[in-house]
Amino acid sequence: MDKETDPIKQIDEMVRELLRETGSLKIKLREVSDDHYKFTKGIFLEIIELADSFENLLEKKNKITDSNVKSLYKLLKRMIKGFDLVPVKADPGDVVDTDIHHVIETEFKEYSDKSIIIRTLNPGYFWKGHLLRPAEVRASVKEKKN
């Protein structure tokens, strides 16, 4: 029997291929674990920096100003951007898409059969192509006529 027809040799070759694939997958798993650790560590360091900023602000008690609050807001926005969070498009005049918009408040309007965003109450975000949180919006609803 030659190598191609000998079942023992075929099984042996399959086992060797599976062992090679297993080794490759172990390396890939280590790389993914390392990336996850670095990303998670980055999140924790950003949260710690934000907590430090709040603590410093609160120690000044009577010194809370618009400037302090704006500084914290900029830090939060930087964190959001740094974590690759992408805002959900929810501009006034856009048609409500219930897959990505959550209507919290409504106003009766007669001008449209579709629900139209009037105002974004809280922004929504995508992360890595997945909806993390829908945008919370105020939207128009067609007024019912009797």
Image: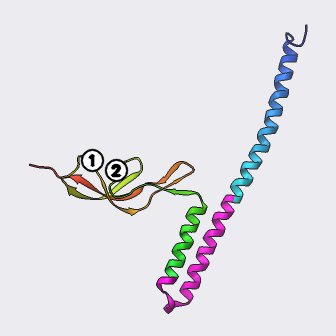
Instruction: Please give the name of the residue rendered at 63% of the width and 69% of the height, measured from the top-left corner.
Output: 46
Residue that carries the numbered disc 2 in the rendered image: 96
Magenta-tinted stretch: 39-67
Q: Main secondary structure of the magenta part?
A: helix
Amino acid type of the residue tagged 1 in the rendering: Lys
- In this rendering, would 115 be left or right of 70? left
Residue on which the image places disc 1: 114
| Number of marks present in the image shown | 2
Q: Secondary structure at mark 1?
A: loop
Where is residue 81, by image quadrant? bottom right
- Residue placed at 87% from the left, 16% from the top? 8
Vertical relation: 92 (above or below) 113: below
Residue 95 placement (x, y as % from top left): 33, 50
List the single residue furthest toward the left.
146
Q: Which is more N-terminal, label 1 or label 2?
A: 2
Q: Residues within 10 Å of mark 1 (few under 14, many from 20)?
A: few
- Please tell me whether residue 70 is drawn above or below residue 143 in the rendered image: below
Which part of the image, by quadrant, shows the N terminus?
A: top right
**The residue under label 2 is which amino acid type?**
Val
Question: How packed is label 2: few (under 14 Cα within 10 Å), some, or many (20 or more)?
Answer: many
